[in-house]
């Protein structure tokens, strides 16, 4: 009977050691899995951040192009108005110069 009790104790100790080994292995495996999962999450987050950044840059460039085009159109319209005014003034200036030339010719 004493031998049987010692045998059971040894078996229990061996089983406890096996359980500890398994627990250590499983905890190490869980840590490795968690690390891989975290790295994947980081990679995914970086990829998404890059996509968001690229989209924002594209949107910004599109908006800048649109504003620049509008600015060029507005500037072109202003130039056309100034050219039209200059042409009106050109005709008046030609008339004024012609009058002075005629006056100077007549006065001499």
Image (cartoon, rainbow, N blue to C red):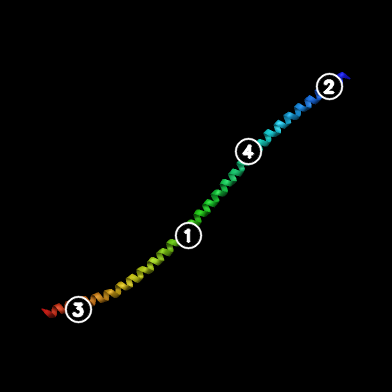
**What's the mark number on residue 99?**
3
Tell me whether the residue at label 4 lies in contact with that at label 2, contact meaning CB atoms closer than 8 angstroms: no
State which quarter of the image contains the N terminus. Answer: top right
**Distance from label 1 to label 2 (Cα)?**
82 Å
Q: In the figure, is residue 78 to the left or right of 40?
A: left
Name the residue beneath numbered marker 2: 7
Name the residue beneath numbered marker 1: 63
Q: Report x, y in % for residue 50.
A: 54, 49
Element assignment for label 4: helix
Between 58 and 13, the residue placed more toward the observer is 13
Tell me whether the residue at label 3 lies in contact with that at label 1, contact meaning CB atoms closer than 8 angstroms: no
Tell me whether the residue at label 1 lies in contact with that at label 2, contact meaning CB atoms closer than 8 angstroms: no
Is 15 above or below relative to 76?
above
Element assignment for label 1: helix
User: Which of the two labelled residues, at mark 3 and mark 2, occupies the earlier sequence position?
Assistant: 2
**Distance from label 1 to label 4 (Cα)?**
42 Å
User: Which of the two labelled residues, at mark 4 and mark 2, occupies the earlier sequence position?
Assistant: 2
Q: Report x, y in % for residue 51.
A: 55, 51
């Amino acid at each position: 009977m004493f031998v049987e009790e010692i045998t059971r104790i040894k078996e229990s100790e061996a089983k406890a050691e096996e359980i500890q080994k398994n627990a250590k292995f499983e905890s190490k495996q869980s840590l490795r899995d968690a690390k891989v999962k975290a790295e994947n999450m980081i990679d995914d987050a970086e990829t998404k951040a890059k996509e968001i950044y690229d989209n924002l840059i594209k949107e910004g460039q599109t908006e800048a192009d649109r504003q620049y085009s509008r600015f060029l159109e507005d500037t072109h319209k202003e130039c056309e108005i100034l050219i039209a005014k200059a042409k009106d003034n050109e005709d008046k200036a030609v008339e004024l110069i012609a009058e002075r030339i005629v006056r100077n010719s007549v006065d001499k």
